[in-house]
Image (spheres, helix red, strand yellow):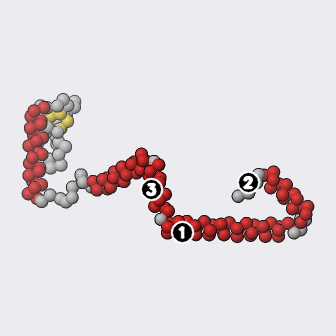
Amino acid sequence: MFDLGWTEILVIGVVALIVVGPKDLPGMFRTVGQFVGKAKGMAREFSKAMNDAADDAGVSGMSDTLRKATNPIGSAMDEVRKSTKSFTEATRDAGKPKSKLSPERQEAKDKIAAHSAKATQERLGPREGRSQCRKCGSRQVDRPRAGRPQESCHKENCG
């Protein structure tokens, strides 16, 4: 506010100590502090009143327009961010299933998945390190090591 450095404040304090005296100095500093606080409060109220008057007159809309005119790339990027955010919010849950399938459709899905897996296994052949399950015929079983046979595969319904 007054652009006073430490040396100026120190000189003012020494002069106040000499002129006012050590006995009345705390009371004087208290009074000065209250005066400065009231002045800051009045300045804050004045500034708020001026901002409110400017908002009522439409100056804030003018400042946004002026900012956009002086920085077209920044305003374009703001629009891109807004569009990206709305697109992200709109498509966030698009890949998730909305509801469970009906039993008939689930059965058809399982048949298609099983047929696709079987066709893929036939086309690729047995992979190294894998063999067929003795119970269900699936090729998802690790080959036995050291002569020990594998009893079941990785499928849940294979017992």
In the visual, does 32 lie left or right of 136? Answer: right
Mark 1 sits on what residue? 53
| Front residue of this view, candidates 93 and 125 | 93
The residue beneath circle 3 is 65
Callout 2 amino acid: Asp
Mark 2, other Cα within 10 Å: few <14 / some 14–19 / many ≥20? few
- Residue 3 is labelled as 2
Disc 3 versus disc 1: distance between alpha carbons? 18 Å
Sequence order check, earlier mark of 3 and 2: 2
Image disc number at residue 32: none
> Which residue is at a point 62% across and 68% down the rendered structure image?
46
Closer mark to the observer between disc 2 and disc 1: 1
Picture coordinates of residue 16, whole percent (x, y): 87, 62
Residue 35 at what x, y percent from top left?
A: 74, 69
Tell me the SS state at disc 1: helix
Position of 112 compared to 49: left or right?
left
Classed neighbour count for the residue bearing mark 3: other residues with Cα under 10 Å, few (<14), some (14–19), many (≥20): few
Left or right of 5 in this view: 120: left
